[in-house]
């Protein structure tokens, strides 16, 4: 039998932030930018929309029978790796805004079994280009020294980068974000250093508003219903989706408002599993 098993990409739901702002929340708690009365919904300080480009870098993906980040570092002892980027220095980098992407690396069929903990290793740096139009006004995200920063209404939108170096504005490094509920389970995110694969936590890992030595982001799903890989499984696919997500506008003014005066940057993304079984003979 020909093995046509293929990995497109494994997706997780996060809200990414720039080095100058901290907005770490589950994707579904970020409301879409409104086309109605106000740009921001209710008392929301952020809104999400579809970017023109969303560039992310993937290094590795896998499926585990137990939580690989339950300890102080990544533990693959109960995992089966399903994707490894060919270039482990630069990863497999792609623009995911247009749709499905073939990652550059080795895709491997998972061993038969039941898995409740998918994981992904990403770069902590993302690049977007985004503009959002409502009621005749277009808001363009622009860059300062390459980093996503301001929003204006004159344009054009600029390709800009966001670095995830902190999950909360605290006196010490906060490199862990856990318990983000999505449809189908819980998402946990961890900032880490590639050379040690350890969590970045505590006063020894950074100063106020940032963690040091961060070059990777690990996402781990705790699925409500485990994935079952049987001998009949031909294709395991998780589709990356930034439609309606991907980019954000921020405000610090009293709501409701149409003023994204606190800039813009990369936003949450989402995705879904598809498992294809061989046809019955």
Image (cartoon, rainbow, N blue to C red):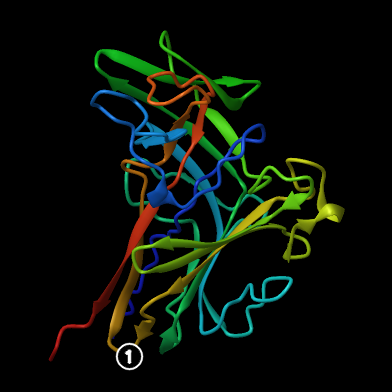
Element at label 1: loop
Residue 157: x percent and y percent?
Answer: 44, 19
Q: Quadrant of residue 196?
A: bottom right
Q: Quadrant of the C terminus?
A: bottom left
Identify the residue at horizontal 27%, vertical 20% (top origin): 134
| Image coordinates for residue 48, horizontal then vertical, percent | 39, 37
Left or right, residue 54 beside residue 136: right
List x then y, in percent, for residue 234.
30, 79
- Crowd class of label 1 (few under 14; some 14 to 19; many from 20; radius 10 Å): few
Does 55 sit above or below residue 198?
above
The reply to whether residue 155 is visible in this rendering is yes
State the residue lying farthest toward the left.
281
**Can residue 85 be seen?**
no
Give the residue number, with chain letter if any, for mark 1: 231
Q: Quadrant of residue 190?
A: bottom right
Judge whether 105 appears above or below 172 on screen: below
Q: What residue lies at 62% left-to-right and 48% top-to-bottom?
A: 124
Quarter of the figure with the N terminus: bottom left
228 or 259: nearer the eye?
259
Image point 35% across, 74% down: which residue? 5
Residue 107 versus residue 148: which sits nearer the camera?
Answer: 148
């Amino acid at each position: 039998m020909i093995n046509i098993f293929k990995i497109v990409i494994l997706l997780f739901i996060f809200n990414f932030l720039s080095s100058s702002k901290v907005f770490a929340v589950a994707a579904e708690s970020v409301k879409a930018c409104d086309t109605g009365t106000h740009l921001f919904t209710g008392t929301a300080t952020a809104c999400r929309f579809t970017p023109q480009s969303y560039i992310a870098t993937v290094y590795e993906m896998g499926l585990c029978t137990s939580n690989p980040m339950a300890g102080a570092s990544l533990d693959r002892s109960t995992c089966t790796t399903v994707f490894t980027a060919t270039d482990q220095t630069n990863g497999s980098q792609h623009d995911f805004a247009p749709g499905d992407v073939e990652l550059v690396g080795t895709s491997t069929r998972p061993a038969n079994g039941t898995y409740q903990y998918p994981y992904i290793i990403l770069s902590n740096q993302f690049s977007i280009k985004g503009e959002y139009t409502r009621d005749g006004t277009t808001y363009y995200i622009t860059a300062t020294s390459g980093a996503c920063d301001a929003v204006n209404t004159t344009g054009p939108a600029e390709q800009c980068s966001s670095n995830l170096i902190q999950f909360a504005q605290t006196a010490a490094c906060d490199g862990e974000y856990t318990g983000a509920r999505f449809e189908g389970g819980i998402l946990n995110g961890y900032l880490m250093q590639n050379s040690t694969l350890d969590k970045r936590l505590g006063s020894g890992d950074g100063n106020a508003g940032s963690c040091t030595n961060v070059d990777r982001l690990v996402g781990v799903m705790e699925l409500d219903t485990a994935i079952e890989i049987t001998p009949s499984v031909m294709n395991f696919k998780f589709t990356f989706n930034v439609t309606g997500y991907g980019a954000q506008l921020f405000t610090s003014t009293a709501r409701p408002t149409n003023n994204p005066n606190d800039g813009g940057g990369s936003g949450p993304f989402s995705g879904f599993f598809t498992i294809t079984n061989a046809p019955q003979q």
